[in-house]
Amino acid sequence: GENVEQHPSTLSVQEGDSAVIKCTYSDSASNYFPWYKQELGKRPQLIIDIRSNVGEKKDQRIAVTLNKTAKHFSLHITETQPEDSAVYFCAALNSNSGYALNFGKGTSLLVTP
Amino acid sequence: DAGVIQSPRHEVTEMGQEVTLRCKPISGHDYLFWYRQTMMRGLELLIYFNNNVPIDDSGMPEDRFSAKMPNASFSTLKIQPSEPRDSAVYFCASSLVPGQGIYEQYFGPGTRLTVT
């Protein structure tokens, strides 16, 4: 089955700096890659996603890049703010095999003022 | 829409007791997913349903766990008998119609289960 690896497990940045979280996946047929943000004690919520026919997608301060050849994708957060502090999960899905998301183990991001 | 609804929000029980977690998906969503979240194992998919039919239950830990979806607006996850290692946050999520390329899953608030 699909295996998603996520790095780093923890990340601390200063407010205003950029943060990058990286994920690799094993199933070359995966075609959907979402990123979820989970604040402490809250539910995971989708913040951005990308499909395999696109190499990059941006939404204000958040961007995701996908390298299908290398089977990795990354989340980029620019001009970080304290409210960006949360756990971020990447996931991969091969829609030809079903609709179960395979999640990475998460990255705990701390943005210090 | 109220979003995905789960109950109870917190459950504390003793080892050996039966635990039933409940979920109401977003109206019109055809897919329902049950996840378990722990620090050690992260977010694990337990089972998911399409139109009330279980599609993949390979993530269900063992026979002590069972899930049902008797209708489009209600699902249960039951643990019998419960054990301390079942302590976790259990999330229910639903999605619209992945077959149309809409894969986003909406999570409920979760049930924090503590088994003593």
Image (cartoon, coloured by chain):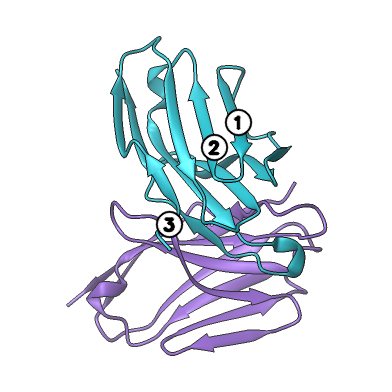
**Chain B's colour?**
cyan
Number of marks drawn? 3
Q: Residue at x 46, y 44 (%)?
A: B91
Whether callout 1 and callout 3 share a subunit is answered no
**Which residue position is annotated with label 2?**
B75
- Label 3 resides on the chain identified as A
Marks 1 and 2 close (CB-CB < 8 Å): yes
- In the rendered image, which quarter contains the C terminus of chain A? bottom left
Identify the mark at residue A9; answer none if there is no mark. Answer: 3
Q: Nearer the viewer, residue B43 or B18?
A: B18
Q: How dense is the environment of label 1, judged by Cα within 10 Å: few (below 14), some, or many (20 and up)?
A: some
For the question of whether residue A48 can be seen, the reply is: yes
**Amino acid type of the residue that numbered disc 3 sits on in the rendered structure:** Ser
Q: Tag on residue B102?
A: none
Q: Is residue B14 above or below residue B55?
A: above
Quadrant of the rendered image containing residue A31: bottom right
The purple chain is: A
Classed neighbour count for the residue bearing mark 3: other residues with Cα under 10 Å, few (<14), some (14–19), many (≥20): some
| Eye-nearest disc, 1 or 3 | 1
Q: Amino acid at mark 2?
A: Ser
Please tell me which residue is depicted at 77% across the width and 58% down the height of the picture.
A27
For residue B52, what is the image quadrant? top right
Tell me which amino acid carries mark 1.
Lys
Q: Earlier in the sequence, mark 1 or mark 2?
A: 1
Helix, strand or loop at label 3? It is loop
Mark 2 is surrounded, within 10 Å at the Cα level, by few (under 14), some (14 to 19) or many (20 or more) other residues, namely: many
| Eye-nearest disc, 3 or 2 | 2
- Residue that appears at 47% across and 54% down: B107
Which numbered marker is on residue B68? Answer: 1
Disc 1 and disc 2: Cα gap in Å? 6 Å
Question: Percent from the top left, x then y, of residue A85?
Answer: 29, 68
